[in-house]
């Protein structure tokens, strides 16, 4: 038996890993930290890319109105058809509901990124305005539909207005900054 205790395998492996490990140069550590920090910052939207609070509120309100109409078409299609004096067509109402859900998603996109506001305005404002104009004719016939369509029309105009205001402020900021 030897005089010194025999080291076990774990102690040997730990000793070998400590002996093989070197301290990285500070410049390398700084570069890695900078890259990791930049990657984390890239995932979060920059302040300049966030939409204004007004744009987010109007976009989400219009998305909610489109979503409400889509659900109403699916749930209360017969009542709506009876109210406007048209035949009930479940297939057409289902497909229109799918289109309204797509419009709601497009409207809500303006609340996520400032750059998506133009897309939202180009697709949702004409739909909202046409629904609003169509809703004016329903005032004496079907008050619930008229109210919903009027709100959608007003929100379409508000979406266009807040997008223009936001775009104008962005353009002014770049002109004043000299870029």
Image (tube, helix red, strand yellow):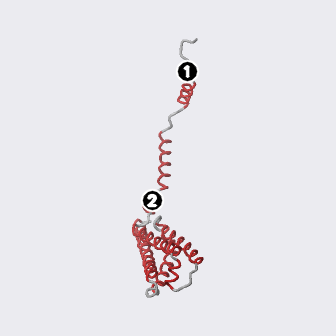
Quarter of the picture containing the C terminus is: bottom left
Element class at badge 1: loop
Element class at badge 2: loop
Is there a contact, CB below 8 Å, between mark 2 and mark 1? no
Residue under label 1, please give it. 7
Q: Could you say where residue 21 lies in the image, as x and y percent from the top left?
A: 53, 32
Residue under label 2, please give it. 46
Q: Is residue 51 positioned above or below 37 on the image?
A: below
Q: Nearer the viewer, residue 157 or 169?
A: 157
Q: Nearer the viewer, mark 2 or mark 1?
A: 1
Q: Is residue 8 positioned above or below 139 on the image?
A: above
**Residue at horizontal 50%, vertical 45%?**
32
Q: Could you say where residue 87 lies in the image, as x and y percent from the top left?
A: 56, 84
Quarter of the picture containing the N terminus is: top right
Q: For the residue carrying disc 1, how many other residues have a C-alpha within 10 Å: few (<14), some (14-19), or many (20+)? A: few
Q: Quadrant of residue 59?
A: bottom left
Q: Nearer the viewer, residue 34 or 115?
A: 115
Q: Could you say where residue 130 lies in the image, as x and y percent from the top left?
A: 50, 82
């Amino acid at each position: 038996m030897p005089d010194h205790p025999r080291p076990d395998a774990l102690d040997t492996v730990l000793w070998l890993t400590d002996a093989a490990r070197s301290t990285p140069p500070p410049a390398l550590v700084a570069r890695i930290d900078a890259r990791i920090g930049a990657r984390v910052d890239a995932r979060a939207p920059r302040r300049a890319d966030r939409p204004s609070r007004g744009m987010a509120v109007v976009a989400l309100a219009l998305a909610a109105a489109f979503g409400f109409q889509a659900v109403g078409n699916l749930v209360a299609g017969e009542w709506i058809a009876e109210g406007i004096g048209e035949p009930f067509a479940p297939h057409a109402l289902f497909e229109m509901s799918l289109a309204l859900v797509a419009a709601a998603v497009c409207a809500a996109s303006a609340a996520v990124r400032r750059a998506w506001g133009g897309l939202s305005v180009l697709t949702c404002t004409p739909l909202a305005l046409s629904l609003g104009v169509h809703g004016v004719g329903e005032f004496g016939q079907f008050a619930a539909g008229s109210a919903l369509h009027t709100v959608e029309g007003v929100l379409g105009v508000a979406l266009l207005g807040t997008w223009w205001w936001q775009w104008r402020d962005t353009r002014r900021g770049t002109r004043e900054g000299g870029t």
